[in-house]
Amino acid sequence: MTDGSGRTAFPPAPTGLGALSATEIMAGYRRRAFTPRDVVDDTIAALQATSEACNAVVTPMYEQARADADRLTREMRAGEAKGALAGVPVTIKDLVFVAGVPAYAGSPMNKAFVPEVDAAVVSALKASGAIITCKTTTCESGYKLTADSPVTGTTRNPWRLDRTSGGSSGGAAAGVAAGCGPIAIGTDGVGSIRVPSSFCGVFGLKPTFGLVPRSPGFSPPSWASLAHTGPITRTVADAALTLEIIAAYDLRDPASLPVSPRRFDTNAAPLNGIRIGASVDLGYAAVSPDVRAAFNKAIAILDSCGAQVTMDGPGLDPDILEHTLKPIAFTEQAAAVATKTTADLASSEADYRDVVSAGRHYSGTDYIEAGYRRGQARGAFVKLFERIDALVTPTVAVTAFEAGQIGVGTIDGSEVDPHLGWSPFTWPINLAGLPAATLPCGFDRDGLPIGLQIVAPWLDEPTIFKIAAAFEAAQPWAKFWPQLALREQSLAHVKA
């Protein structure tokens, strides 16, 4: 993988323990090279420095994290520590409940709300021994694809502070990209894991709808039929390990799937026999030249890994944004605040109020008709996956734009919807409920990361991990760090 100038770019890695992968951290514990307290101290230092620059943290949980680390340090010394992620730092997006910790969800309306219970994913992570370090920034109720909100302000990209982190899991992705711990939990209603992961140059996974329970959470939830929960990491192995822990059946979530515990193979192997369909624009999207170029190089890499790559796609309705997504997403967003008054929404962003207003003006018939069209789109993917094993597209049609903006209105001379039109590859996958991941595949001319999206059939996360692991081995991206991650730190411990 090269930077925008065509030069191979391998900047030195940060020396803080928070920049290690989860698998490296656990290997270090087995060697007794460092302790959970060492890791947490370095991770907190990185979080504090990164949040000062990028505004990634909403609510620090540092004292509790240190206490958990001290307990796990004692248990490890006694040979009593248990759990697949024992001693590994994890951050939690502020749309996901942590008991006793404020859950603002980017909204001034929630300024006094403190949940009494953990979300199912948080319970699972705690049971695995993971250490929760903080809540990370999001936009208001996750309504847009940046992490800016009236509660926290603008979240910035560690690769360039004048650019957005993307969102709505922007604080999560910025933290992982800057070496603030190996794992973040995000949510994804129209691309909110994949967009910031693409913009920040990390790996992000949206699992099959219902594989990871979303309960308990805000009720009714925003984007109720669209939202997924999943991991953001630097490596494929860390994402697979996290998904093994958080994927579970939970009766409290009516969409939860009654599937057995799963294990995923992330050993790199040739892709011989894997049929991959590739589409740079899904037949309707405007795409920036730099993204097109990086995508073409990425599919050449997949071909070199042994995959059978053909140009193919689902053949979706070019008006799917206006005719299908908006009537569903905006109506569900409006329903989430149906009991709120104009006064309640007065402190919300104007764009958020516009979305709620639009949602309130769609009729029940509009919503149901959009559901029919959604079914047609799902059927198109069913037919597509009779021909291929996976689909690859760009993750986002552009790279990170100016911080503080909702989006861009023009791509390569074509006008697009500034709210959602510049991310035309992510939200169709939410409408279908399919699993999808983004991995770093290059840089634009300004040195900003570009992502490749991998989509597989329902519950076929193993194929995503197989393709991603092969690409990761062929073009390792974890060696690339934003300049912000190379900050000077006074560390007592270094990578052993």
Image (cartoon, rainbow, N blue to C red):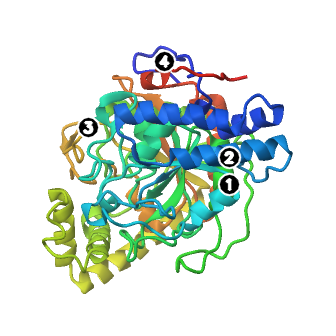
Q: Residue 223, relative to residue 406: is it above or below? A: below
Residue under label 1, please give it: 462
Residue 342 x %, y %: 13, 72
Q: Of the residues shown, which amino acid type is indicated by label 1?
A: Pro
State the CA–CA distance, disc 3 to disc 4. Answer: 25 Å
State the CA–CA distance, disc 1 to disc 4. Answer: 39 Å
Residue under label 2, please give it: 466
Going from N to C along the chain, the mark reached first, 4 or 2, is 2
Residue closest to the eye, 482 or 103:
103
State the CA–CA distance, disc 2 to disc 3. Answer: 34 Å
Q: Which mark is residue 403?
A: 3
Q: In the figure, residue 157 lies in which quadrant? A: top left
State the CA–CA distance, disc 4 to disc 2. Answer: 36 Å
**Is label 2 in contact with label 1 (beta carbons under 8 Å)?**
yes
Q: Residue 5, relative to residue 235: is it above or below? A: above
Camera-near label (2 vs 3) is: 3
Residue under label 4, please give it: 488
Camera-near label (3 vs 4) is: 4
State the CA–CA distance, disc 3 to disc 1. Answer: 35 Å
Camera-near label (1 vs 4) is: 4
Local packing at callout 1 (Cα closer than 10 Å; few below 14, some 14-19, many 20+) is some
Residue closest to the eye, 452 or 400:
400
Local packing at callout 4 (Cα closer than 10 Å; few below 14, some 14-19, many 20+) is few
Q: Of the residues shown, which amino acid type is indicated by label 3?
A: Ala
Report if residue 15 is visible in the image: yes
Kind of element beneath mark 2: helix
Q: Residue 345, relative to residue 252: is it above or below? A: above
**Is label 1 in contact with label 4 (beta carbons under 8 Å)?**
no
